[in-house]
Amino acid sequence: MTSPPLRLFWHRRDLRINDNTGLSQACSHTPRVVGVFCLDPAILSRDDMAPVRIHYMIGSLQELQRSYEHLGGTLLIVQGSPIQLIPALAQALNVEAVHWHHDVEVYAKERDRQVVNHLQARGIKVETCWDQLMHSPDQVYTQQDTPYTVYSPFWRKWVSLDKPAPVSAPTHLLGLTADELEQVKQLGAIALPTAKDLGFHWDGPFVLEPGERAAKNQLDGFTAQAIYDYGEARNYPGQPGTALLSPALKFGVVGIRQIWAASEQAMAACNSDEARASVQTWQKELAWREFYQHVMYWFPELEAGPYRSGFATFPWENRLDYFEAWCQGQTGYPIVDAAMRQLNETGWMHNRCRMIVASFLTKDLVIQPQWGEKYFMQHLIDGDVSSNNGGWQWSASSGMDPKPLRIFNPASQAQKFDGEGEYIRQWLPELRGIDTADLLTGQIPPLDRQRCDYPAAIVDHRVQQQHFKALYQRHFKG
DNA sequence: CTCGGGTTGGG
DNA sequence: CCAACCCGA
């Protein structure tokens, strides 16, 4: 009695069964598709890992492993370099092919190139495809066949393309035999460790529970209701107006085609122009994610530093005491500090606030954006290289095309988007008794600051804004 | 080649 | 009403 041929599906940023392009392709060849996830020390030991993100990843893997088991299959966990382990597993199991999805990041592209080489050297077939984007980087070009570097024309092109439908999930799988399981244990297959086992400690809450089921529930809930008010509600950090799907998107716990289909369904159910505009605003956010992944793919130098060459030599002042105050939420600017405390306590920050604190770090504190970018990666549950880098380059005005300097005024931002001080009071409980007007402007009387043990403003926004503009003029024009 | 236009802003 | 210069058609 012989088993059907075996294929490996290597999970990376696609921790799900449903709407999984490569997994479905593998399953079209054989019912014996075995999943594998590799705990790569080169990634886990990076100094920009966030414990909360590892917890989310491990939780999602737990559910994925159970899903494989329910379908009759196997999800293997290995720990070590995938460059050695994936080919070794594939060879030992005598697989017909190894499947995985393309990625846009520098490290992933190089790692994958090496895995391909090792597999091909052993005569093992490699089948890869795109999955984490609606449209891969080679599908969205200008009329001159170049990649876009500006969002708006990108969006117009991107939205005009035919959208792929969700992919159906396997209904049953065949796992490894007892002999094969024994064999892979020799090669280093292990039981899924906890995040704590890996040295990551997180006792805080989850903005989104790990796993495919929670992500699907979140998507269903959002597209049934909040999406219709998204255009307006998304601006207020004190209100639950956003989808909270970023961790799921980071780890591919939900499929992008499924998300798009849900948004289109919501669009079809709209009964007002405002609702339709809201749904489209959310779809534009999905396109921002794709835009940033595309530019990361085509311009990998973005990951290392500013795209605008002049910014590489910008005279950042990089004061460590200012940076520390920013990290700890002790700048004396309530909206900035509230946002940083939200990040530190929950591993998530509202996007409006991400822009406020990024503007404050770069323009008011004159600290290079890379420091903030890294701090975000060290704390964000959804920390994604492309989105995070794109956001920071936008805030620092160092991205693809020159823009007017946008210097956010913390007081007007707070007044516009946290008018009742609700968000500030939630994350700065020591300031709950302060007058709302003072909370928003940040002009808290010195005696009140002392009583609340809240720091005086470390810089003066009006002064720093002038200072930055002068530095900018001198550097780029002078 | 010209020309419209540019995420969410500030004063 | 100033952003401020270049992308993209």
Image (tube, coloured by chain):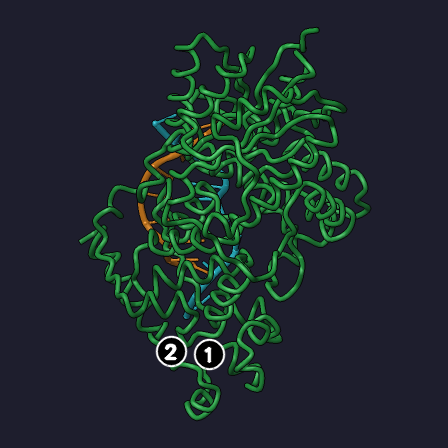
Chain colours: A green, B cyan, C orange
Identify the subunit bearing mark 2: A
**What is the secondary structure assignment of the residue under circle 1?**
loop
Q: Amino acid at mark 1?
A: Gly
Residue drawn 58% across the image and 66% down it: A417
Residue drawn 46% across the image and 70% down it: A337
Q: Would you say A402 lies left or right of A475 here?
A: right
Which is nearer the eye, A253 or A130?
A253
Residue drawn 26% across the image and 57% down it: A472
Give residue A367's position: percent from left, percent from top: 30, 60
Q: Amino acid at mark 2?
A: Ala
Mark 2 or mark 1, which has the lower sequence index?
1
Please state, as top left, top right, bottom left or bottom right, where the C terminus of chain A lies in the image: bottom left
Quadrant of res A409: bottom left
Label 1 neighbour load within 10 Å: few <14, some 14-19, many 20+: some
Which is nearer the eye, A333 or A330?
A330
Please state, as top left, top right, bottom left or bottom right, where the N terminus of chain A lies in the image: top right
- Residue A74 sits above or below residue A29 on the image: below
- Residue A455 sits above or below residue A200 on the image: below
Residue drawn 70% across the image and 46% down it: A214
Q: Residue extending furthest bottom?
A: A447
Label 2 neighbour load within 10 Å: few <14, some 14-19, many 20+: some
**What is the secondary structure assignment of the residue under circle 2?**
loop
- Residue A190 sits above or below residue A55 on the image: above
Give residue A443's position: percent from left, percent from top: 45, 83
- Residue A82 sits above or below residue A286 on the image: above
Quadrant of res A150: top left
Mark 2 in CB contact with mark 1 (< 8 angstroms): yes
Give residue A357's position: percent from left, percent from top: 44, 62
Give residue A166's position: percent from left, percent from top: 70, 28
Which is nearer the eye, A454 or A13?
A13
- Residue marked by disc 2: A457
- Residue marked by disc 1: A442
